Structure formats: structure tokens, C-alpha cells
Image (cartoon, helix red, strand yellow):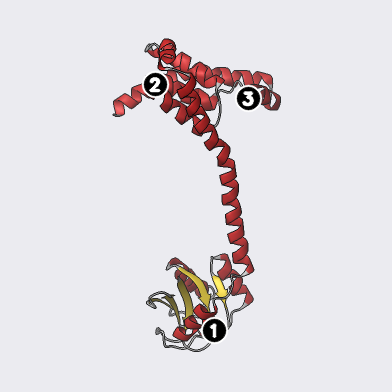
Amino acid sequence: MKIAVPAVEADLDAEVAGTMSTCRYLLVVDAGTMTFEVVRAPSEWGRPGLGVQMVSRALSLGAMVFLTRHLSPRLAETLRANGFAVVTGAEGTVREAIGWYLRCAPAPEPAARARLSAALGRSLRQLVVMVPTLLGVVFLVGLLRSFISKDTLAAVFTGHAVGDAAWGAVFGSILAGHPVNSYVIGRALLEGGVSLVAAAAVLYTWVSVGLVQLPAEASALGTRFALARNGLAFALAIPVALITVLLAGWLS
């Protein structure tokens, strides 16, 4: 953890500066090794915005905590907005102030706790959303391996490029679902001896044509639009699959 401390000199044994207005140095100290980097006040100190420049530089050096004696509410708000945890009341030298902070270890401020809670909440919601998709992947793989034999696939997908692309488009249109699942289906088809052009058509129509969702799409966007969009996407599946395979062969 790195701690930024305003100081009157560029030394760990220098006094902590009373305010940013009297700060000539901002020490960014690694609390684990007590090594530090120095952010020096610009020569034209006093011009508006220079204190913020020093703070931004400390942030870029990895500082997470700003430790000082006193701080104006406005600057404290700026520091928090830039990701700092702000701790006031530091006394003595920079070394002593950091030791005091590490011993006392103030609890995270409300703003920091709120950001942490929000981040954990977003992560949990993403996990909940992904669980059905992951279960669907497992289900689809098991379904393909258990109920669709290689002989069945060979009977449908004969190796004719256009025919395989057409059947792949039909297959993908009927079994539309989450895009992630399409890759699992495509890989399973390839492992079952199905041609690459058929797998490409499945992937394309899986995410662009949805017979299952067609009623909902027609209700939301209009029947004519839904039929036209799905029909056009299905018609394009065959040339898109053929071009994809040709490009893949050329690039390889």
C-alpha cells in the first residue's frame, strides 16, 4: 500500500506539512518497505490548480491513502473523487505519521465503503446472470452427445458446402439462444464430423435469427419488420458461412 504525505522536506524524518498551501513536497511512501518517491511542488507555487496537479501525480504513482494534518473540505472531496482514502490528524514526522496510521488503521470512509459495496454488488449480479448461461452450456453439450449420434449428423450434413450451410442455418434458427452457447454447439458439431461451413452457419443464425423469439419481436417492432429481418438474416447465412470458411482457409 502506498501512502501520500505532504511534507516540509523530501525526507521521511521531515515534519508533516500543516496544509497543502505550506507543502513543498508530497511523499508517496510504500508502507511495506518505507521506500518513497517525491512529488515536488512546482516553482510557480501559488497558481490555482497546482495542488491538484501534485495530487494527480501522487495518484499516478499508485498512492491510495492521503495522510495529512488538516485538509479543506473541497480538496478532500477532490481527493476522494480521484480514488484516495483521506485521513487527517497526522502529527510529527512522515515516518511517525505513517506508523500511527498503520497502527490505528482507520476504517474505510463511507464513500470508500459505498464504492466497495457497489462493486461487490455488480460482481454478484453478473455472476447470477451468468449462472443460467453456464448451466445451459452444460445442458446443450450433454444433449448433443447423448441424443445426436455421429450417424445422424452424417445423414444430415453430407459434406456438400451449400447444403451443409443451409442445414446449419435451419439448425441455428430453431435453436436460437445465448451467443456463448453457440460456440459450444459449433465445437460439438465439429467434433461430430460436421463441416466447418455448417458450424459457421449455425453460429451466424444462432445469434441473428430467432424463431422462438419471433412472436415477441413482432409484438415489439412490428410483424412486417420481424419477418423481413429474420428472413434476410436467414438468407444471408449461407453466403456468410461460405465466405467465412474461404477467408479462414486463406488466412491460415
Q: At label 2, which amino acid type do we have?
A: Gly
Residue 49: tell me if it is visible. Answer: yes
Query: For residue 188, which quarter of the picture?
Result: top left
- Using a 10 Å C-alpha cutoff, classify the residue at mark 1 as few (fewer than 14 neighbours), some (14 to 19) or many (20 or more): many
Q: CA distance from mark 3 to mark 1?
A: 62 Å
Query: For residue 57, which quarter of the picture?
Result: bottom left
Task: Tell which of 197 and 15 is nearer to you.
Answer: 197
Q: Indicate the secondary structure of the residue bearing disc 3.
A: loop
Mark 3 vs 1, N-terminal side: 1
x then y, percent, for residue 28 = 43, 75
Q: Quadrant of the C terminus?
A: top left
Mark 2 vs 1, N-terminal side: 1
- Residue extending farthest front: 146
Q: Residue at x 51, y 16 (%)?
A: 170
x then y, percent, for residue 194 = 39, 19
Q: At label 3, which amino acid type do we have?
A: Gln
What numbered label is drawn on residue 213?
Answer: 3
Q: CA distance from mark 2 to mark 1?
A: 69 Å
Residue 173 as seen in the image, left or right of residue 244? right
- Using a 10 Å C-alpha cutoff, classify the residue at mark 3 as few (fewer than 14 neighbours), some (14 to 19) or many (20 or more): few
Q: CA distance from mark 3 to mark 2?
A: 28 Å
Task: Tell which of 247 and 179 is nearer to you.
Answer: 179
Residue under pointer 2: 192
Q: Residue at x 58, y 68 (%)?
A: 80
Residue under pointer 1: 90
User: Does 26 appear above or below 56?
Assistant: below
Q: Indicate the secondary structure of the residue bearing disc 2.
A: loop
- Using a 10 Å C-alpha cutoff, classify the residue at mark 2 as few (fewer than 14 neighbours), some (14 to 19) or many (20 or more): some
